[in-house]
Amino acid sequence: MSIELERIREAVVLGNRDLTATLVRKALGAGLPPGAIMSEALIAGMDVVGQKYSTGEYFLPEMMVAALAMEEALSLLRPHLAQGNYRPRARAIIGTVQADIHDIGKNIVKMMMEGAGYEVVDLGVDVSPEAFLEAVRRQLPRFVLISSLITLTMENMKKTVEAISASDLRENVLIGVGGAPVTKEFADRIGADFYADDARGCVLNCNRLTL
Ligand code: B12
């Protein structure tokens, strides 16, 4: 990893928002690829934060400041990832499941999807199965993308798939699920159409399914 990316990763781990933003601006100015900044510095930094939280070295406040640094960096990367030539390939709706407020991964998936030419309607976080279903009815998307970061809230992912499957709208949509604790095996078990372990995988699945 280049020294620039390593510094950004460390700034995220320390939750130093100003330093993270300054370093990301510098890296973009120096022509580093936004995708590398995202995966090798920012996402890698959040992984370290997660490990530190798991081992008891970090607590909630440290996790929160790291998330804020990450969000600031994402706002700088956004215009570089979403290109302007826009005739949407298809529409997607995206949201984090009910009782879960983690949205960094969801926001990255949204950005990468937009960068790949999809129109994405963001339902936000803590989205109930009923709200997902209502959005399917109103927005008539091709893809429904559901994110869950907490093992317990994966149950709400299942309920969301069930709610859509019990409606007359199931055959119109393809449901993709993801988030750190989600697996392909879980996705198959709840009847989702695809699973990906990162944002690029989500885009590749959507591309494959819109062919
Ligand atoms: C940052 C963070 C927070 C921030 C969230 C800020 C925000 N705006 O999102 C704050 C501090 C608020 C927070 C709160 C909590 N957190 Co938290 N948090 C994290 C942390 C450190 C990083 C998560 C993250 O952003 N990762 C980076 C992103 C880029 O990764 P990602 O979300 O997995 O997304 C990628 C892929 O999974 C995929 N993807 C994601 N969504 C989707 C959707 C689709 C359709 C597809 C295809 C792909 C896909 O693509 C993304 C990009 O590549 C994780 C630890 C970890 N390493 O996961 C803990 C973690 C998720 N949190 C955890 C917990 C327990 C909590 C709390 C309950 C703590 C508490 N006691 O209050 C609360 C949650 C309250 C609630 N009701 O939601 C646990 C969950 C344990 C579990 N498995 O059940 C973790 C794993 C920490 C731990 N090691 O214990 N948290």
Image (tube, helix red, strand yellow):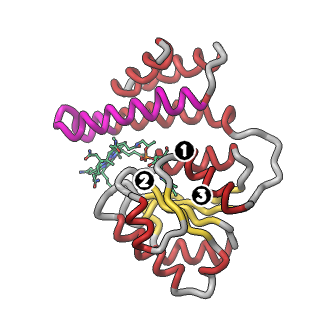
* Residue at (64% x, 57% y) in the render: 206
In terms of sequence position, does the residue under pointer 1 or pointer 3 come before the other?
1
Spot the residue most to the left: 56
Q: Which residue is mark 1?
A: 108
The amino acid sitting under disc 1 is Ile
Is residue 37 shown left or right of residue 171? left
Judge whether residue 76 is colored magenta. Answer: no
CA distance for labels 1 and 3: 12 Å
Q: Label 1, label 2: how many angstroms apart (C-alpha)?
A: 11 Å
Give the image location of residue 28, x and y in percent.
Answer: 63, 20
Quick check: is the Cβ at mark 3 less than 8 Å away from ligand 1?
no
Residue 181: x percent and y percent?
35, 54
Comparing marks 1 and 3, which lies closer to the viewer? Answer: 1
Mark 2–mark 3 distance (CA, rounded to whole Å): 16 Å
Question: Which residue appears at 37% of the width and 33% of the height?
Answer: 66
Q: Magenta segment range?
A: 35-63
Q: Residues within 10 Å of mark 3 (few under 14, many from 20)?
A: some
Q: Nearer the viewer, mark 2 or mark 3?
A: 2
Residue pictured at 38% horizontal, 50% vertical:
180
Assign the magenta stretch its main secondary structure.
Answer: helix
**190 vs 15, nearest the viewer:** 190
Query: What residue is disc 3 on?
Result: 122
| Disc 1: CA contacts within 10 A as few (<14), some (14-19) or many (>=20) | many
Q: Quadrant of residue 167?
A: bottom right
Q: Secondary structure at mark 1?
A: helix
Left or right, residue 157 beside residue 21: left
Q: What residue type is disc 2 on? A: Gly
| Amino acid at circle 3 | Asp
Q: Which sits in the foreground, 70 or 156?
A: 156
Task: Identify the residue under disc 2.
Answer: 179
Element marked by disc 2:
loop
Taking 16 as reference, is 190 above or below it?
A: below
